[in-house]
Amino acid sequence: MNSFTGANTVFANRGIHAMCSEIIKFRKQLTVRPEFRSQSGWTNALNAYMVEELEKLSDTLEHITYNPDAAKTKDALEGEASDTTRTLAQDYNNAALAADNVLGAPVREWPLPWDLSGADPDLPQVTPETVPNDWARSFLVYLDEMFVAMTRLDSRCQPVTITKNESAIVRNQYLGTLYAICQRKGGEVNKSDIPAGTLPSQEGKTYSTTK
């Protein structure tokens, strides 16, 4: 089954679109790594990169979670908007986006811009043949499942933010699991011993004078 099966491909929420873009960028970098073709595992450097990107995804998730600085009335917000001395820095909410604090015009739905079928060479479906390392393959498939889960949130119909409950679900069920894979199965210390590095299925690619 295609690992993107079930994803909603057209929705309004700009925050979810942004999160999905980050997931795809991360995925593109991982699927080209030759380390994932190793049965034993992957390097400390690659593992550190994976952890760093997960933290960036976590940061984005936090910022698209609805969390206003304080309960401000519509009149108070309108007063701030007409204050000619006010700066964007004063309006900036370090905890989350404030775009959903004021009701605006209905937002347009936008399609996801990627071909998720596996035909795009930058977004291939992973298989035991292309990614022999079991935990690397599990990581990529679970990353895809997080992508699908983001597009299926009820908040996909909202303008920019998602609810705190949805954010907690994504953080605990997906980001937490992906982080655990890096901690328990990534890096040199967690590599498996592989006596036979070249498998019978790979013999056809080795040098032979009979070819």
Image (cartoon, helix red, strand yellow):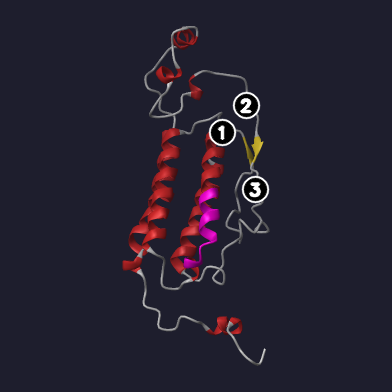
User: CA gap, disc 3 to disc 2?
Assistant: 21 Å
Residue 88: mark: none
- Measured from the top left, where is residue 192 in percent x and y? 37, 74
Closer mark to the observer between disc 3 and disc 2:
3
What's under tag 2, amino acid-wise? Answer: Val
Q: Are marks 2 and 1 in contact (CB under 8 Å)?
A: yes
| Front residue of 132 and 144 | 132
Numbered disc total: 3
The magenta stretch is 25-35
Find numbered disc 1 in the image and state the secondary structure of the residue it sits on: helix
Q: Is residue 4 above or below residue 14?
A: below
Q: Is residue 181 visible?
A: no
Check disc 1 and give the amino acid type: Arg
Indicate the quadrant containing the N terminus: top left, top right, bottom left or bottom right.
bottom right
Q: Is residue 138 left or right of residue 124?
A: left
Q: Which residue is mark 2?
A: 107
**Secondary structure type for disc 3:** loop
Principal secondary structure, stretch drawn in magenta: helix
Q: Residues within 10 Å of mark 2 (few under 14, many from 20)?
A: some
The residue at 46%/68% (across/down) is 134
Q: Position of residue 28 (x, y in %)?
A: 55, 54
Residue that numbered label 1 is attached to: 14
Task: Tell which circle, 3 or 2, labels the residue nearer the N-terminal end.
Answer: 2
The structure residue drawn at horizontal position 50% and vertical position 24%, both measured from the top left corner, is: 99
Instruction: Mark 1: give few (<14), some (14-19) or many (20+) Cα within 10 Å.
Output: many
Say above or below: 32 vs 8: below
Mark 3: few/some/many CA within 10 Å (<14, 14-19, 20+): few
Report if residue 142 lies within the magenta region.
no
Q: CA distance from mark 2 to mark 1?
A: 9 Å
Can residue 66 be seen by looking at this rendering?
yes
